[in-house]
Image: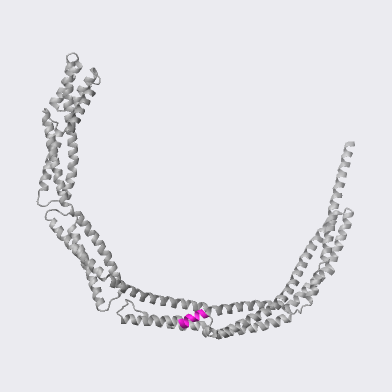
Amino acid sequence: MVVTMSAILVFAIIVILILVVYRKSVLKKIQDAINKKETLSKTPIGDNIEATSKLNLTGDSFDQFNDYKEKYERIIDDELPSVNVALNDANSNAKVFSLLKAKSLLSESIITLNKFEDSMNEIDDGLNKLKDLDDQHTRAIDELDKQIKDLNKNILSKNYSYGPSSDKIEDELSNIKSDYQKFIKTVESGDQYTADDILNSLIKQIETIYSLMKEIPKLYLSLSKDFPKQIDEIDRGHRTMIETDYNFSDDNIDENIEIIKSAIDKSIALLSELKIDDVKQENYKIEKIIDSMYEMMEKEVIAKRKVRKNIKLVYDYIYHARRQNHMLISELEQLSKNYTLEHDEVKKSKLFAKRIHQIESVYNNDYQLIMDKKAVYSEVQSHQQDSKKQLSAIEKEQKDINDSVADLNDEENSARETIQKFDFQLLNIRRKIDNLNLPGLQEDFIEKYKYSYKKVSELGSTINQVKISMDEINKKLSTMDKAMEELISDTEEIVDNAILAERLMQYANRYRNNNEEVNSACVEAKDYFDNNFDYEKSLKIISSAIENVDSGAFNRIKKEYYQNKQNDSKKA
């Protein structure tokens, strides 16, 4: 029971301490709100209202000023005292620990004070704006006066440079002057808001007329002087060119000159209405047409110079190609008596002759047009360029053909030497085999030898014909070369195996009486040697038996054999 009472007492003390601390916080916030209220009540906005009231305001500006004044007086005279009462009530309630009510009154008062602060800032800013507008408009009257006088001076002194647009520009300046007088009266009447709208409009009008005064002289200069001068120059130049033997494939210069004259009249009319963007578009079109006419005339002048420079060069080129073609065809026809030309060399050369003739026909036609003073030089120049390109390609192709047939005699001599070499190789093979006095040869080797002998004989007959095909002969030689290599390799293998087999059988005689295995191997190896002509199998049987009784003997005999063979080859 005693413990429970103590706990209650401690809890009560804690609650009291919390309330005391919270009351202190609320009282401080109430005092802060009272201080803010005092600050708002002492704001110098009243002085600002008095200073603004001395301005001669009228219209919307005057109505706005009265709204600011009435709103300010309502806050100071009625609303701030009400907030003061609420804050005093909050303070009283807080002191007697009626903290919830005090907090509620405080919160409402703070919200109201913040609204008053925003309103008073808005009033102060609005009053400052009215005074600033009054100052700006007073200064603007002098600045606008200077600008209008400057515009008037420029328009009068440079009236000629604006051409048909001068009347419209003067009308625009009159409108500016009229609006300027209206602006002065509005400023003097005190309606600063309306005056500000007029000022902004005046600024835009002045910027526009300055822009017009900057752009129009350049546009009018093009229309009144530059374009007429250029079309006159083009007209005279065109007539001079026609009189001096120039021609055009699509001569529309006279038509374009009339189009440009109409476009100039249209552009001047647009200029008189101050439709600057439309004038720029028309002038751009005129410039494009003028540029195209200059380019067309310049193209023919340059082309004529190049044509006259290249006329003899192209003729020489044609003559050279024709002569080269004639020599090539003659050479090919001569070669075709002894050789079969299998790559359409003659046909291609005759096609070249036809193309050269066509090029020459174009050249002759262009030359006649020049002589008759009817040539369009740009077209002739194009023909010359195309002719040089074609002739260059023909020259290269003719050279390739000539190079391809130039070596036919050399190829024939080389082929004859190769056939002779094959004959010698076949003879050598025969001698090697005969010198061994072998009991016979296997059928496949005999067939290879007969095949090679037959083909070499056929090659000899083919190359001795009146008319030969080197492509066919070279192809057969290539095939024969591989066959001969294989036959020589087979021959060497037969010779080596036969000689080594004989030597090993002789070496085996020392073991035959005492070794049945060697004796049997000798009999078997001799049978393969004499009856089957399989010298490789014979060598394999006898060498295996020798190795069993005398290890290393076969390698010694084989090494000695190949060393002697190599030495004999060097001596030969």
List the single residue furthest toward the top: 514
Q: Residue at (88%, 60%) from the top-left corner? A: 88
Would residue 268 appear left or right of 304 to someone viewing this image?
A: right
- The secondary structure that most of the magenta stretch takes on is helix
Residue 461 location (% of width, % of height): 10, 46
Residue 145 location (% of width, % of height): 66, 81
Q: Can residue 1 be seen in this snapshot? A: no
Tally of numbered tags: 0
Would residue 442 appear left or right of 175 to someone viewing this image?
A: left
Image quadrant occupied by the C terminus: top left
Residue 353 location (% of width, % of height): 19, 64
Q: Can residue 544 be seen in this snapshot? A: yes
Residue 68 location (% of width, % of height): 77, 72
Residue 388 is covered by the magenta coloring:
no
In this picture, which residue range is highlighted in magenta?
Answer: 217-225
Camera-side residue: 479 or 398? 398
Q: Quadrant of residue 239?
A: bottom left
Image quadrant occupied by the N terminus: top right
Residue 218 is covered by the magenta coloring:
yes
